[in-house]
Amino acid sequence: MFNAINKGWNINTSPLYRHITAKKIDQTFVQEMKNMLVTSIKSDPDCKFITDDLEMNKILEKYK
């Protein structure tokens, strides 16, 4: 998921959205989105299985 956030999406390659003018990606927004995702995962009790995993914690810290 984090890789997809970093990569972005070229809207013009989609047959459904090819008529829409693409906008420049705001990197501040991308960083805020990653921070909110990490914070949500760490604070959600339903995601405890993720935060209990050491490897996943390393990944979460990398993107925070």
Image (tube, helix red, strand yellow):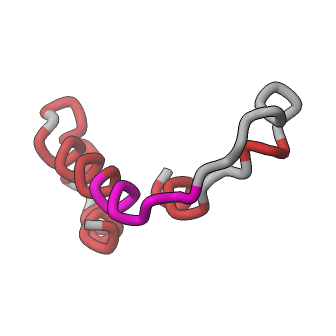
* Segment tinted magenta in the rendering: 24-32
Q: 6 or 1: nearer the eye?
A: 6
Q: 7 or 53: nearer the eye?
A: 7
The reply, left or right, for residue 9 in relation to residue 35 is: right
- Image quarter for residue 49? top left
The reply, left or right, for residue 2 in relation to residue 43 is: right
- Image quarter for residue 34? bottom left
Q: Residue furthest top?
A: 16
- Image quarter for residue 63? bottom left
**Where is the C terminus found, in terms of image quarters?**
bottom left
Give percent across and percent down for residue 39. Answer: 17, 49
The rendered magenta stretch, by its main secondary structure, is classed as helix
* Residue found 41% across the figure and 65% down from its top: 27
Give percent across and percent down for residue 53. Answer: 27, 58
- In the rendered image, the vertical position of residue 56 relative to residue 49, given as above or below: below
The reply, left or right, for residue 21 in relation to residue 8 is: right
